[in-house]
Amino acid sequence: MATTSTELLPEETPDEPTPRPALDLEQRRHQIFPTLSPADIRHMQRFGHVVCFKNGEMIFEAGKTSFGLMLVLKGGIEVNRYDGLGNTSYVTTHQPGQFSGEVAQLSGRPSLGNGHAVGDVEVLVVPSESLRALLVAHADLGERIVRALILRRVGLIEQASGGPVIVGPRGHGRIHTLQSFLQSNGHPHVVLDPEHDQQASDLMAHYQPKPEELPLVVCPDGVVKKNPTVVDIGRCLGMLPELDGDKVWDVIVVGAGPAGLATAVYAASEGLSVLALETRAYGGQAGASARIENYLGFPTGVSGRALAGRAYVQAQKFGVEIAIPAPAGRLICDTYPLQVEMCGSLQKLKARSVVLSCGARYRRPSLANLKQFEGKGVYYWASPVEAKLCKTEEIVLVGGGNSAGQAAVFLSGFASKVHMLIRKDSLSSTMSSYLIERIQATPNIELHTCTEIVALEGDEDGLKQVRIRHARNGDECDYDVCRVFLFIGAEPNTGWLSDCGVDVDAHGFIRTGFDVTKSQCKANFANGVYPRDLPSRAALETSVPGVFAIGDVRATSTKRVAAAVGEGAAVVSQIHQFLANLPADKLGT
């Protein structure tokens, strides 16, 4: 799969206030619905089996059928979008030599559309596992197939079709949470307001939900859920599969940011079995970056979401099992294989090695009623979902790092004014110079130095006012704004590791390699013991054998996307070395 071409996955988060269509469906129809040659079909035949259908028969059904890929040999497959409310719309009819499916089929997830037989139909069914083998075995053909699958997903996202339907009143905080989760994971969906949509109104009248049961969500298979959690949504879309507690993975990667995805891609491509667990969305904090301009190989920049989307598909191509949302709750190191206990359940997953790429979380300021306004005026991400809420409004953005700078520039294309607050007297020590220059050149970004938020005011409908204090003179002033974005530094996501005894520094970041050895030496000298024969460990290995740490969560790491990807690649060779030195009885566990 060609991952360096910007043509492979269109940019989905342009900086303009009114995003232009990222995908010209007609111009790229030959790529979206390619017709394979007889030679291509011969290559594919050894990876699948032939199935026949009669005219009008349902071949696959939205939300229910997992089929991999279907290549039409005779007849046709009429494909229609389906939204769970019974609405359908025609997409295309696959003719002989064309194939059905989109990105979901790489990992065996349910279809997002309906397919019916046109005439007497013969199809070559290529299951997901065989499809991944095909993509690796035939690179040229694989690139064309993957490009088509990705472009079809992009088309579904742009047309807001083929996914869950969220029904609830405009501005409801839970709607924002679910919408942000789906958009961050590149999943199509639609939001309907019962005040303006008759079907949504009828659904509300039928189910008569209580206020605490909003919003309603209609899954692609037609099942209606009341105020579902993101875990519920993940399960109904197949993003959170049932995981086998008896299977022993070669590698469990905790966190699917740039570092974790890099580990997953390199490890799986080298034959290791890999499970990646992610709490919120693939790409991590980098996935929320509106535009990364200093990443090697992208001279015009690339959005974090587009970069993460490529890596996510690439990981699926090599057979990585990715579970979202799947937060790890505890790491168990006193037995072997190692075990990761899932948060909120007693399920334990086994692994010969564990890679911690669980990253860091944005800090929350000490404001009494902060939680009341999260999702209803206070946000920690700046995606197109939040940007649309800011149109023509003045907003406040807090933070002076690169993520804050990227968010400020992105949001300035939507908001009438961005008030950027930092505690220091300049951005020079915390932000890349190109971003500082961009901010200075953007007329509707106003930088407020030596300032901080001291109070939030509002009601049950959301945030209404922000009080800001100027540190130099202690003066306070109120701003009538309804949107605040917080990017105020990060703290490591390592609290769940305490039972395992993974060594961390004073700030909670994980020590690896020589830093672990140095820490142990200091501890031994303090106790009057001269250290002898301290165990040797790889550069990215933690104090616990077989447990590695990479990316932002690692002490002394460089907090850059490129550095995270580099560590994700480098750790795989160290995992190989660790597994090679395991006793035969443990390796076969």
Image: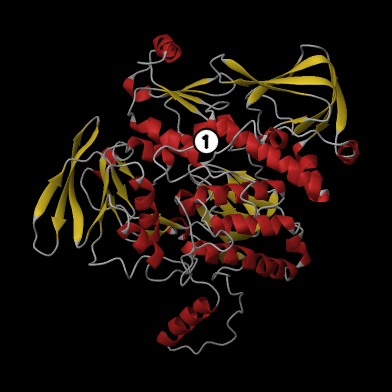
Secondary structure at badge 1 equals: loop
Q: In the depicted view, which residue is nearer to us: 98 or 169?
A: 98
Q: In the depicted view, which residue is nearer to us: 408 or 529?
A: 408
> Picture quarter containing residue 202?
top left
Residue 53 pos. (x, y %): 83, 17
Height in image: 367 above or below 87? below
Q: Is residue 83 visible?
A: yes
The colour style of the image is secondary structure
Q: Is residue 108 visible?
A: no
Check disc 1 and give the amino acid type.
Pro
Q: Which residue is identified by label 1?
A: 21
Height in image: 117 above or below 491? above
Residue 569 pos. (x, y %): 63, 64
Residue 489 pos. (x, y %): 34, 60
* Residue pictured at 29% horizontal, 50% vertical: 397
Residue 398 pos. (x, y %): 28, 54
Q: Relative to residue 55, is residue 334 drawn left or right?
A: left
